Image: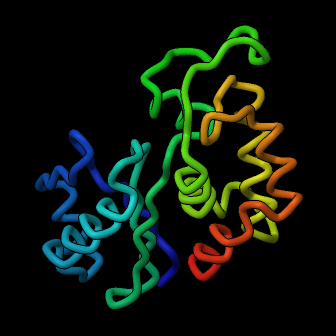
Amino acid sequence: MSKRVVTVPLQGGKVAVNPQFQDTLKQLGIDPNVVVQKVQEELKRVGKYPVQKVELEVTSPTRYEVKVYLPPIGDLFLKIFGKDVGAHDSRNEVIGNLSFEQLVEIAILKKDELKSKSLKSAVKQLLSTCKAMGITVDGKRADEVAKEVDGGKYDEILNKFEKQW
């Protein structure tokens, strides 16, 4: 059986089981109840962040993977802060503040999209987006935090999350 991708219907951030979705899974030889439970577990993992879509990659009736997609990073930040656009003048305007731990969590969730080799470089990539959008981290400008990351100030926090990377 070749790999088949099934889009999981969502409504309000939860799985919206419909007859078409159930029939598709049954045709693939998969129990819909087990899939729904697994999708709900994955959605809990990213619970506080908005989900763009969920897909089920099926390789066989016993082998499938749930993929949860978050919006692109800029859109994700805007949704977190309830804004429509970033700062017009990011040097003088702040649209929101993230904790460093939140930034690391987002880096872990967006690992595949970032394509960074290390958690530290992924966090620095997110910091550059924060700088451009007018988002502070721990109350400081993103470029200041990036220098502190290079200086080793956040190594303890990064090491704590390294296992998840």
84 versus 150 height, above or below: above
In the rendered image, residue 11, in percent from the top left (x then y), is placed at 22, 41
Q: What residue sits 33% from the left and 54% below the top?
A: 47
Q: What residue sits 41% from the left and 46% below the top?
A: 49
Q: Between residue 15 and residue 58, name the one nearer to us.
A: 15
Quarter of the figure with residue 30 = bottom left
Quarter of the figure with residue 108 = bottom right
Image quarter hosting the C terminus: bottom right
Q: What residue sits 67% from the left and 72% below the top?
A: 156
In the rendered image, residue 150, in percent from the top left (x then y), is placed at 88, 58
Q: How many labels does the image show?
A: 0
Q: What residue sits 21% from the left and 50% below the top?
A: 14
131 versus 113 height, above or below: above
Q: Between residue 11 and residue 158, name the one nearer to us.
A: 158
Name the outermost residue toward the bottom.
62
Quarter of the figure with residue 117 = bottom right
Q: Between residue 145 and residue 16, name the one nearer to us.
A: 145
In the rendered image, residue 107, in percent from the top left (x then y), is placed at 63, 57
Q: Between residue 68 and residue 61, name the one nearer to us.
A: 68
In this picture the colour scheme is rainbow
Q: Is residue 112 left or right of residue 84?
A: right
Q: In this view, does 26 lie to the left or right of 57?
A: left
In the rendered image, residue 45, in percent from the top left (x then y), is placed at 36, 64
Q: In this view, does 14 lie to the left or right of 145?
A: left
122 versus 78 height, above or below: below
